Amino acid sequence: MALKHEPTAPYHSAQDALRVLETVARHAGGVTDAEIARRTGVDSERLTALLRMLRREGYVEQTTDGAYVSGAALARLGSAQGHDQALREQLQHTLDRLRDSVGAAVYVTRYLDGEIQVTGWADSPAMPAVHEWVDFRSCAHATAFGKGLLGQLDLNGRRDHLSRHRPARLTARTITNEKVLLSKLDAQTPTVPVLDLQEYAPGTVCAAVPITAGSAVGCLALSLPLRHAHRLRAAANTLNRGAAPVLLSLAI
């Protein structure tokens, strides 16, 4: 299966952040932002934003003299013992923070072994997750993250998936015509969030953005009750801007 996607802004941010972390990790005694910029080639304005994000996520810390050193989160992830647990905790921490900034339930989804998997989420009583009334694995055609994942596959990959999971009508808005669906997927721009306007469930709207690096296809998504539909596009843009820390936690 070939992929059909181009790197998005969160991907580039995560790649830059990884370069920054590698530079910081090589200087146990601390390294200045000027030296980080020189070694990574990241301009000062962008570096300032990256270092702010890395400090917030606990990947780096700033010493009293202004130098940067590896943070507690990076140390936990760098330990062979308990790495998987530390990774889960870091991802959940990131998702919880993103949920609060977006004001919606958020989800991480991956396309693994030909199937859709929801690998993480963050919700709350005020921002409940969407009720999975039909298995998400069979509803790629009707969900924002499903369409976002399929959109990153090539045509053969999309057709293979749809041959195994025939589009079924879930609501009056669900696209069930395969030709129409494939046309919409082909027209979707990677930098524009994918939307689900009550296609999976009445009373629910969703959005998704790609968080793909290399051959691992993924999406970050959010859901809102219909009464908050007016916030969907703004929330989707906030989600897109906040995707880099999620992608980074998956890449470390």
Image (cartoon, grey):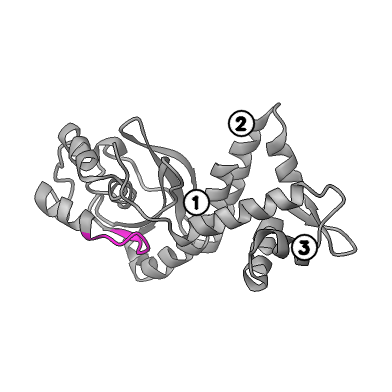
Question: Residue 60 location in percent, x, y?
Answer: 74, 53
Distance between mark 2 and mark 1 Cα atoms: 28 Å
Where residue 173 sits: x, y (%)? Answer: 16, 56
Amino acid type for the residue under numbered disc 2: Asp
Location of the C terminus by quadrant is top right
Amino acid type at circle 1 is Pro
- Is 23 positioned to the left or the right of 66 in the image? left
Return the disc, 2 or 1, that comes first in the chain's sequence. 2
Give residue 33's position: percent from left, percent from top.
76, 65
Q: Position of residue 1 (x, y in %)?
A: 29, 36
Badge 1: few (under 14), some or many (20 or more) residues near its Cα, within 10 Å? few
Disc 2 vs disc 1: Cβ atoms closer than 8 Å? no
Circle 2: is it few (<14), some (14-19), or many (20+) Cα within 10 Å? Answer: few
Report the span colored magenta.
Answer: 187-195
26 or 227: which is nearer to us? 26
Q: Which mark is residue 125?
A: 1
Question: Which residue corresponds to the image point at 62% horizontal and 51% vertical from the top-left?
Answer: 18
Query: Does residue 32 show up?
Result: yes
Q: CA distance from mark 3 to mark 1?
A: 45 Å
Q: Nearer the viewer, mark 3 or mark 2?
A: 3
Residue 188 within the magenta-colored segment of the rendering = yes
Q: State the residue position of label 2.
A: 84
Residue position marked by numbered label 3 in the rendering = 35
Q: Nearer the viewer, mark 2 or mark 1?
A: 2
Local SS, label 1: loop
Of the numbered discs 3 and 1, the one sitting upstream in the chain is: 3
- First in residue order: circle 3 vs circle 2: 3
